[in-house]
Amino acid sequence: MPFKTTKIWIRAARLRTLPLSISGVIVGNALCVQQANFSWLLFVLMLLTAVTFQIVSNLANDYGDGVKGTDNAGRIGPERVLQSGLLSRQALKKGIVGVALVSFLLALILITAAFGSNSWMYFLIFLGLAIFSIWAAISYTVGDKAYGYRGLGDVFVFVFFGLVSVMGAYFLQLKEFSLAAVAMAVVVGLLSVAVLNLNNMRDRESDAAVGKRTLAVLLGALGAKYYHYFLIGGAVVILIVFSVQQTVSFSWLVGLGVFPLLFHLLSVIKNNDPKTLDPELKKVALATFALSLLIFISFSLG
């Protein structure tokens, strides 16, 4: 593959979104890293699977929004590859199918490594989750009934980036659930939705103009802001409550990850121009990723 073509596909993969996609996996594994039966192989397979799921979503998002005309000159965010003519519809469609197959293969290897032939019920449940994850990644913007155009994107992001990612990672490692995993799943889910909400707040006017009914469009400018306060505030409150039950080192490390979120909240409160929200989107995504790493470090230290 020529270097120029490779650069185009890398651009289409939107690498800046990948750290957020693995944050839940890191947190879920952090909660069980001290257990004797913790598997680093499973951890690595989970990371690779999560990354490929996200790339499928990014390619499909580019394709779906491009075909529907949502990506146009009025859009504030970065220009997409289909919109700019760097890739054709057919090429992008083939890319989606190819990466989807890779993600399914990785998920199959992961599930087999986790359960083997010991539990066919869990094997089938997680295989179903993998298939549903690929469907959700594609159906966000692709098709006549794309749920991202019906105000349901936030729900799916909360479920897959939060609940499935954290609790799924925890269960794959220990074959059980815990209250801590549920709490951290909600935290990562809320922060992931906050990233999506910032994206939708930024694109609210251009989305409304082409009929894309995101939650930010439905809530309006002020309502989307209040919703954002709830997402960030809720995540911070749960983290603080959870920290009380953990070690001092955990509280200090998590505190480092919380401060950027609070500063971000002040920026959103003062914001009057959607165009300036794009840097804030990156800040929350990176803050969530940094927080996941700090949580992993804290639990690794015991």
Image (cartoon, rainbow, N blue to C red):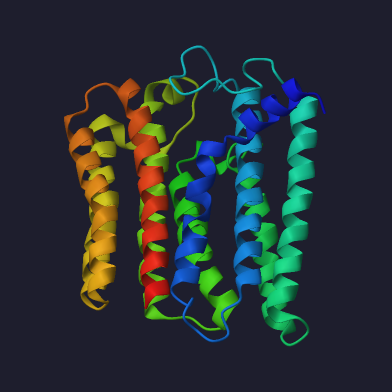
Q: Is residue 144 visible?
A: no
- Identity of the residue furthest to the front in this view: 301
Tell which of 249 and 226 is nearer to you.
249
Whole-percent x, y for residue 70 in the image: 54, 23
The residue at the point 27 percent across, 45 percent down is 227
Whole-percent x, y for residue 121 in the image: 70, 82
Q: Is residue 8 above or below residue 168?
A: above
Q: Is residue 153 visible?
A: yes
Whole-percent x, y for residue 100 in the image: 74, 48
Residue 179 sits in which quadrant?
bottom left
The residue at the point 35 percent across, 30 percent down is 279
Tell which of 178 and 61 is nearer to you.
178
Number of on-image labels: 0
Tell which of 302 and 295 is nearer to you.
302
- Which quadrant of the rendered structure holds the N terminus? top right
The residue at the point 29 percent across, 32 percent down is 220
- Which quadrant of the rendered structure holds the C terminus? bottom left
- Identity of the residue furthest to the top in this view: 73
Whole-percent x, y for residue 134 in the image: 67, 52
In the figure, is residue 261 to the left or right of 155? left
Q: Is residue 75 above or below residue 107?
A: above
The residue at the point 70 percent across, 59 percent down is 131
Q: Is residue 195 above or below residue 64?
A: below
- Identity of the residue furthest to the right in this view: 1
In the figure, is residue 249 to the left or right of 293? left
